């Protein structure tokens, strides 16, 4: 039985309580054996390793409840062609080195066999959510479906739960509900196919909003705004207003109503199965999400800081959801980095300030997500959330919200599985050591052999 002592660190244990200073954490047999006030290293005799953690901060391994591209198989709830296995493993490496030790893949059509093969290839704990209900499958087939095999199609949500899936989700998704996926994938692809011109996600989003509005409705069409969006994208004279309307409507609308109906359908199946349902919460789906929140299903309102919301709208909607018992999730998206669709952290900060956030995830942001610890670090420095509360949102709160996702994880207390992250308290996203099941699997930004 291997024993490791993490010596002299500060500790935020995931429970939301105040930090403890200068403690030793003894890990043995894959679990946290004891936490004591720091004592001389020679007290521990011939343990396997003593890690000098003075001046560093220990937190539980992060539990990320909204990831894409983290399991072999179709990508996104639109059933897009799957990533190369090497890219999936690189995505998992990225999450691990950011301090995440458990991910929930919400691509939705992944099979249990593909999950098992991925898990064998990487030390992160990977759990599965399913979106394979009739409406969601129909919407995916209309919107894309390029990566769906017969095995994916027949592995329904009910089959997935019986095989160990811990939630239904992501239900809706930006790829079938006219969200970010339409803006960074499908609209640019169709514009380029028609014109040979490459446009950015933000330019595509401008076209989409001008044609269909934030809430996705044909009634929102605004000719003047479309002309402005065409000019901004450098497409004036290349596409007409009517061409643009045809492209955007043709990408977004065929699957939209079916995907919207799929929210309630999936919530009903989740209720029957006794698992949570994680839904795409955005301006276009907010009415349906609120209706589901009124029922007795465990609802996780994904990325409640979605860029389609106006600030006041987001805060008021999240507040109503929380009052009805829903779990309000925010995602890092590409808020601090690429900002291909987001414009900054204002929505995120406003939701933290309002005290309505329960969990923190990343989502995908077209492969440009920001680390959870970066978002926590910036939010703490902005004064909108405390360190203990934010760490709990990324660890214990997630474990509690989705009981099957991380059993005996999410808190650094004796008897819990030792999924631990040692990081720099001054720059939380500068991760030093990551442990999974009591084994050090990453040091100083590099994976190491367990």
Image (tube, rainbow, N blue to C red):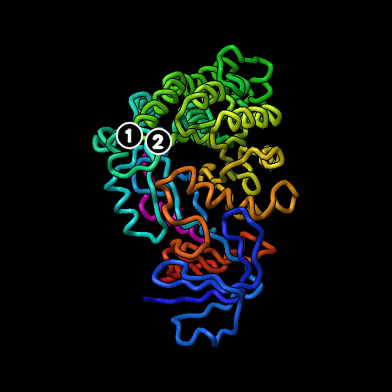
Q: Which residue is at 48% across, 67% downward?
A: 442
Give the structural element (helix, strand or loop) at label 1. Answer: helix
Work out whether 283 lies above or below 130.
above
Task: Decide whether the magenta segment is chiefly helix, strand or loop.
Answer: helix
Dot placed on the residue nearer the N-terminal end, 1 or 2: 1
Residue 252 lies within the magenta run: no
In the picture as drawn, the residue positioned furthest to the top comes out as: 219
Mark 1 and mark 2 in contact? Answer it, CB < 8 Å: yes
Work out whether 299 lies above or below 44.
above
- Report x, y in % for residue 317: 63, 28
How many tags in the picture?
2
- Report x, y in % for residue 66: 49, 43
Q: Which residue is at 69% across, 16% downward?
A: 224
Q: Which mark is residue 157?
A: 1
- Report x, y in % for residue 400: 49, 46
Q: Which residue is more in the foreground, 279 or 36?
A: 36
- Look at the image and tell me whether residue 95 can be seen: no
Work out whether 411 lies above or below 287.
below
In space, the residues marked 1 and 2 are separated at their CA atoms by 7 Å
Magenta segment boundaries in residue numbering? 81-97
Q: Which mark is residue 168?
A: 2
Q: Which residue is more in the foreground, 408 or 312?
A: 408
Q: Quadrant of the N terminus?
A: bottom left
For this view, does 381 lie left or right of residue 5?
right
Residue 87 lies within the magenta run: yes
């Amino acid at each position: 039985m291997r024993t490791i002592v993490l010596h002299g660190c500060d500790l935020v244990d995931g429970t939301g309580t105040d930090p403890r200073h200068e403690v030793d954490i003894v890990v043995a047999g894959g679990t946290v054996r004891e936490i004591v006030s720091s004592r001389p290293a020679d007290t521990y005799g011939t343990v396997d390793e003593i890690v000098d953690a003075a001046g560093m901060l220990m937190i539980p391994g992060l539990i990320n409840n909204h990831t894409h591209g983290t399991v072999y198989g179709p990508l996104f709830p639109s059933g897009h062609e799957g990533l190369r296995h090497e890219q999936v493993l690189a995505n998992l490496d990225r999450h691990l080195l950011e301090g995440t030790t458990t991910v929930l893949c919400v691509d939705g059509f992944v099979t249990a066999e593909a999950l098992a093969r991925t898990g064998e290839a990487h030390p992160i704990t990977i759990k599965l959510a399913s979106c394979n209900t009739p409406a969601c499958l129909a919407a995916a087939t209309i919107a894309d479906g390029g990566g769906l095999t017969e095995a994916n199609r027949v592995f329904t949500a009910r089959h997935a739960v019986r095989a160990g899936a811990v939630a239904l989700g992501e239900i809706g998704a930006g790829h079938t509900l006219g969200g970010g996926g339409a803006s960074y994938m499908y609209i640019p692809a169709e514009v380029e196919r028609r014109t040979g011109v490459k446009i950015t996600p933000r330019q595509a989003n401008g076209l989409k909003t001008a044609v269909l509005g934030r809430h996705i409705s044909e009634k929102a069409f605004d000719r003047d705004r479309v002309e402005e969006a065409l000019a901004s994208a450098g497409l004036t004279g290349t596409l007409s207003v009517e061409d643009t309307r045809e492209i955007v409507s043709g990408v977004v609308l065929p699957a939209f109503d079916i995907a919207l109906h799929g929210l309630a359908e999936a919530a009903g199946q989740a209720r029957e199965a006794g698992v949570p349902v994680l839904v795409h919460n955005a301006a276009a789906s907010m009415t349906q999400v609120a209706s589901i929140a009124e029922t007795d299903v465990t609802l996780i309102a994904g990325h409640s800081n979605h860029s389609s919301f106006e600030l006041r709208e987001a805060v008021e909607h999240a507040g109503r959801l929380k009052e009805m018992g829903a779990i309000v999730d925010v995602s890092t998206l590409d808020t601090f980095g690429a900002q291909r669709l987001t414009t900054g952290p204002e929505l995120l900060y406003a939701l933290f300030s309002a005290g309505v956030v329960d969990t923190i995830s990343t989502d995908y942001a077209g492969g440009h997500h920001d680390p959870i610890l970066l978002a926590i670090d910036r939010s703490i420095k902005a004064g909108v959330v405390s360190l203990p509360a934010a760490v709990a949102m990324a660890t214990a709160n997630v474990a509690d919200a989705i009981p099957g996702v991380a059993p005996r994880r999410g808190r650094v207390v004796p008897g819990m599985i030792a999924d631990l992250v040692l990081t720099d308290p001054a720059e939380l996203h500068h991760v030093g050591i990551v442990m999974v099941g009591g084994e050090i699997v990453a040091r100083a930004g590099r994976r190491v052999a367990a």
